[in-house]
Amino acid sequence: MAAYKVTGLHSHNFISGSEELIAVWHKTPLAYRSGSWIRGATLTDGLDAYMASYLDKVFLVNGTDNNCEYNGNYWTFSENTLGSPIAKYIISHESRLFLYNIKILGTRYPSRVWFCDLPSLGTVTWGLDYGTDLVTTAGDATITSATAHFKTRNIKIGDPFFITTGTNRGEYSVLSVTDDNTIELTENLTFTASGSSFWVGSNWFDVGTEDGDEGMGFGIASNEIVCLKKNSAYRYNVAGQTLRQIKDVPGTISPKSIVNWGGYCYWLHPSGIYRTGGGVGEKISNAIEHIFRTATVSDFTGTVAWVNQLDSTVNFSIGSATFEDGDSFTNLTISFDTNSKIFAYRDYPKNFKVAAPWLRSSNPEVYIGDDSSGVFQMDTGTSFDGNNIPCEVEYYTVYPSGEEAVVTFNRIRSYIKNGPDVQIFYKLIYKPTNQEDVWTSDETWNPMIGSQVSDRVDWYFLIDARASGVKIKVVESGADESFVLEKLTIYYSSAANS
Amino acid sequence: MATNLTEKNKDLKDVSGGVQTKTTQFLRKDNQVESATNVSFGPIGGIEKIEGYSQLGNTITTSSTSSSTTSSTSTSTSTSSTTSTSTSTTSTTS
């Protein structure tokens, strides 16, 4: 059976009580319901899809197909998405849906955001109509389109009216909407024509149009929409309808790296991890800058991020990476603790393509989709789907008597609960040599002698462990309940007394 | 082994500073580490292994049960229009 990547993931708990996770896979969105994957509409194969919850429905966009929605019973392209422009990205905020990097009549507007009208009686219109059958008469301001739905789709007085082909090509303004097929413009048209292409509507704004860039996704910060492009970031205030650039931060080339937590919008750029609280932006990844400066990363564009709400971490799954010192990762994931502002790494044995939170039976959970038809619950259990979780911690060199003194390292007393599989390794740093003014350091790790058979155990160095400093690495791999490392105590003697 | 009376000790009991590779070794704080993979600093000052992951349901296949969809007839000829028929099959669930 062929395997495909999961290209979209979203959760929605319907008012009816049905809690569902929707995955986009191959050519279809599927809803996980009552233990089974239920297939839905037909889409173009393999496209990244983004979803948003709105009006107790799930709206889906993929930049190519007409937008569609799911109400818990069926998928449809012809209800609340009818008349909406095709879009790459979507977000729900302040009672509206916003679409980004849109397409109207086959023409892409990469920096344009289109938003829906306010909902009425549980349904929504988009204030947009378009067609290719416009009929105009010279010297007359009235235009008609047999296939239009001007009134139904809520075209408004004052809306800009664009004729995009033919002799009357240009921008006009709506004076009045007569019926679904007839509009009167504020000026007479010059030529009689038929079959012209047009679109009309005003529910849009452009984000940095003249920069040759394109919209890459939405975030939320300080109750404003963060509109990210590849090289820039903007914030849009819905109530005030104001757009401002967030200065001195880049955008993102990784749409799935955009996440929101704790009042901040976070995203990844090849130069680092950034966040904004709405006003200014900042790079937060300085402590691990080597990942972005010197490490070899296969592809930042597919970075997938998620928030673990229980431990308040924001996690960025980057994929295959190799550090300058040779450490390699199958799926390097950077974990940032938003409370303590510290970093740790993870290495997963599979590639992640999408991630989504799901409040399932009142439990905040996180799910990821991989590149091989699988969806997994993250941060659960003691194994990677039955496989051992390998872990290690490498301490910085400890110089017990300062970098200049030479000591003899005797043993390490480890306080580790539940750690029978723990191993400890060491490297001696700045060992004296036969030459008075030359010191060397171990290049490879030496195993310490011992075994964590209880919560407090002594491990021993090999003989003649004389040096100025020692690096320690703790390693464990298993599928059982985790150990807890509380303390390591290094015992040493001064060189004169050893 | 008997305790050496001239022996001294150095505690490493706080790693709450997490990973930091920006500075040289001589400027790092005592509670920072050079690397930490698949561990969390959940117990303040200590280290434990991260949790894992487990598969949700079965691997997705093309034999998943289909749901009904409504047809979509776009009135604009230039947009991509997908049509679907309302069907409800009883194929094997995945």
Image (spheres, coloured by chain):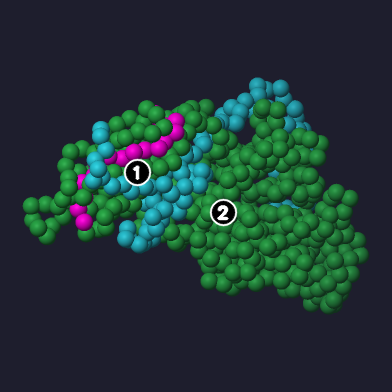
Chain colours: A green, B cyan
**Numbered disc 2: secondary structure:** loop
Q: Which residue is mark 2?
A: A339
Judge by depth and name the residue closer to the eye, A46 or A148.
A46
**A163 left or right of A260 in image:** right
What predominant SS class does the magenta segment belong to?
Answer: strand
**Relative to A315, does residue A421 appear above or below in the rendering?**
above
Give the chain of mark 2: A
Please state the extent of the stretch shown in magenta in the rendering.
A405-421
Q: Quadrant of the C terminus of chain A?
A: top left
**Numbered disc 1: secondary structure:** strand
Residue at point 36%, 38% (across, down): A414
Residue at point 68%, 70% (across, down): A243
Query: Label 1 is placed on what type of residue?
Result: Thr
Judge by depth and name the residue closer to the eye, A346 or B33.
B33
Q: Residue A151 at what x, y percent from top left?
A: 88, 59
Any mark on residue A489, and which? 1
Observer-side mark, 2 or 1, equals: 1
Residue at point 76%, 58% (across, down): A94
